[in-house]
Every structure is written in C-alpha cells, then in structure tokens.
Amino acid sequence: MTSLRVGYDVRPALFNYAGIGRYVRELAVALSQQPEGEGPHLELFSNAWRPGGSLPPGMAEGRYSRRRSLMPFLAPSGAQVFHWTDYDYPKVRNVPAVMTLHDASFVMDPKFHGWDSARLLGRVRSAVNHADIVIVPSEPARHDAELLGAHDEQIVVVPHGVAPFFRPPEQPLADSGYLLTVGTLEPRKNFLRLLLALEQAWARDAAPDWMLVARRGWDYEEFLVRLDSSRFRHRVRWVESLPDAELLRAYQGALAFVFPSMHEGFGLAVLEAMACGVAPVVSVKTAAAWLAGQSAMLVEPRDVDSICEGIERIVSSTPWRRQAAAVALQRAREFSWQRCAKETMAVYHAAIKSYARHAERMSAGSLAG
C-alpha cells in the first residue's frame, strides 16, 4: 500500500523549544513511526536547515524527506496534503491544507502576544478561511477557532500527547517539596499575580519555595522588577531552560504544579506534570482545567487572593493532594503522541475528501455558468 505523502511544516521543531516546538517534534516522530502502509511519508518543509536545526530524534528511517523552500505557495512535489503547524505562514494552493490552531489568545487580549496583534489576527483569520480543516488541541480551543471564523464542521479536536519519558520517580527525590511552574515569561501566563499570591502565602509560612522554569518572552519587565525587589526573592529559583532530563527531575520533585494562566489552547506543561504524578493548580474555565479534569485545584486567575488560597489548600491538604496526584496520573494516560498521530492521520484523509468535494462544486459551478 502506498503511503500518504504529507507536506509537513517542521520549522517550529527546529528552532522553537517552547510548547509548539515540542508538539511539532513529537507529532512528526509519532507520524513517522506509524505502521507501514498506515502512516504517511513526511515531506518535511523548512525555509532553512541551519546549524542547530537538526531533525527530531526518533524519526523512522525512510519515512521522511527534507524539503527547502522560501515561499511554499506550492506544496512539495508529490505531497497530497499540507499541514501547517504554526500560526503564520503563506498559503499552499495546490493541495488540501490542514492547520493547527494552538490558541487564539491574541484575540482575547492584544497584550497576550508579543508583536503586532492586529496584523497577526488578519493573517490567522485568512489562514483559517483557507484551511480545509483546522485542528485544535482541546474542546475549549474550539471556541478560539470559532472566534477566528472557522465553521463547526471545519474544526477537529486532536489533543496533544505526552511522552512516556515523563513519569513518576521510582522513589521520592531528596530535594523534593517545592512548587513548580513551567512556561514563558509573557502576560497571559500570569506570573506577576502568581508571585504576589506566593508572597502572601510566604508571609504566613504557608507555602514552600517556588521553582520557575521560564524563558524570556515579552512584556515581562514588571514581573522581573517585582521579583528582584521582593523580600522573598531567596525563595524563588528561576531558570530560563532545562534539558529534558533535568526538566523531568524538576517535575518529579514538585509538591504541586502551579499554573494560573489566563488563557491556553491546551497546557502541555500541565500534562507533563500530571504524567509525573503531580497535582496541578490551574485557572477555572480554561483548557488547562479541561485537561486536568478532577485532578485540578481551580483558581480565579485575575484574583490574587484566589490563587493564594488555592496554593495554600493544595499544600496543606495532604490526603486530597495525594488523591489528586493519582487522578492526574490516570488522566495523563489518556493522552499519547501515538493517539495524536492516528487522529491527525484521520484529519489528513478528511481534508483530502473535503478538498475534492469543493473542487467538484467549483467545477460544476463553472460548467453551469
């Protein structure tokens, strides 16, 4: 059986190490590892293969080809469908188009994105309108796609996965017991309010130290000023990034994962923490709350007192926290990159059928005219 040939935008996997980059890497590997005849042959598109832009490890040999193009208005030769994996890109015009919409935070608040939000909004709306199918990673993210003009029948929910690498420790770690947050320094992650809430808890000696793993994004200056001037600065360990082995250890040693983000499309770091057996504190009515399910301690993200109360409750309620951690681990087992790859393959086939139907309608209209 001939494999489906898929044009695949691999750029975020090469040069972006945040959540989108991990999604693109893990999905590419899982797609390449699908059984022969069922999985695709990936035509990996990048406008540059610079030093440092190596392929994701684990790609199955013979299941991919490298392609380079500066302006891919036409899909790579032989591709039957093209998958754009990030927000902003030129349109592919000669084959069906699938796009992944990670979230639409820039619609909720222009401050939630680091550059010209009006320009981004126009380009993403155009991309949504052009796409045959729009993948979103959670049920709440369906609303994001609708805000950008996607029709209900155009939207398909395909949740991200979590690698088996993220797992509970075999035995308790000696340096465990801190609160952990993983993300990017940007307004929607809500780190300033989180710091203020932690300062309240620390003033009552009601919370352990905080470990923050966060690269610099945008509009983070106010947070850094507050952090540097805080009388509790010694209780915060901030690192901009960690290799995966150290990130795993950070998850495994955490008492709880604290993530009061104001908007998410999914919450991959929340899922990774859950897979390590760590209960999360997340914002109510967000994709992270949908993801965490019954394992979550829910807080109001714009209310510092609510965030503080959630932290103090999860720290002090040891039986509840242990039960929540067990529920989180069980919930995390529902998500895998292999499942994500299989459901994404189904989207590719659906996009091809949708594209063919549209072409038939256009042809019939031309003949009628």
Image (cartoon, rainbow, N blue to C red):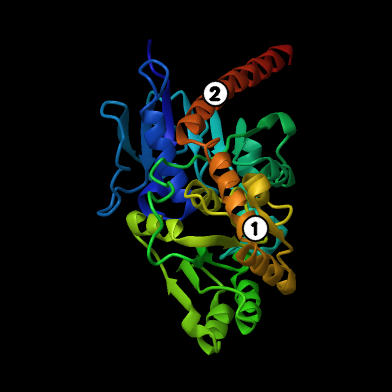
Of the numbered discs in the image, which one, if any, rests on residue 49? Answer: none
- The first of marks 1 and 2 along the sequence is 1
The percent coordinates of residue 9 (x first, y second) are 43, 40
Q: Is residue 319 left or right of residue 94?
A: right
Mark 2, residues whose alpha carbon is within 10 Å: few (<14), some, or many (≥20)? Answer: few
Q: Is residue 155 left or right of residue 4?
A: right
Tag 1: amino acid: Val
> Nearest the camera: 81 or 166?
166
**Residue lying farthest to the front in this orientation:** 319
Which residue position is annotated with label 2?
A: 346
Residue 131 in view: no
What's the residue at 63%, 62% (across, down)?
A: 314
Residue 61 in view: yes
The percent coordinates of residue 124 (x first, y second) are 61, 48
Q: Is residue 85 above or below residue 351?
A: below
The percent coordinates of residue 235 (x first, y second) are 49, 80
Tag 2: amino acid: Ala
- In the image, which is nearer the foreground, mark 1 or mark 2? 1
Quarter of the image for residue 127 reads top right
Which residue position is annotated with label 1?
A: 282
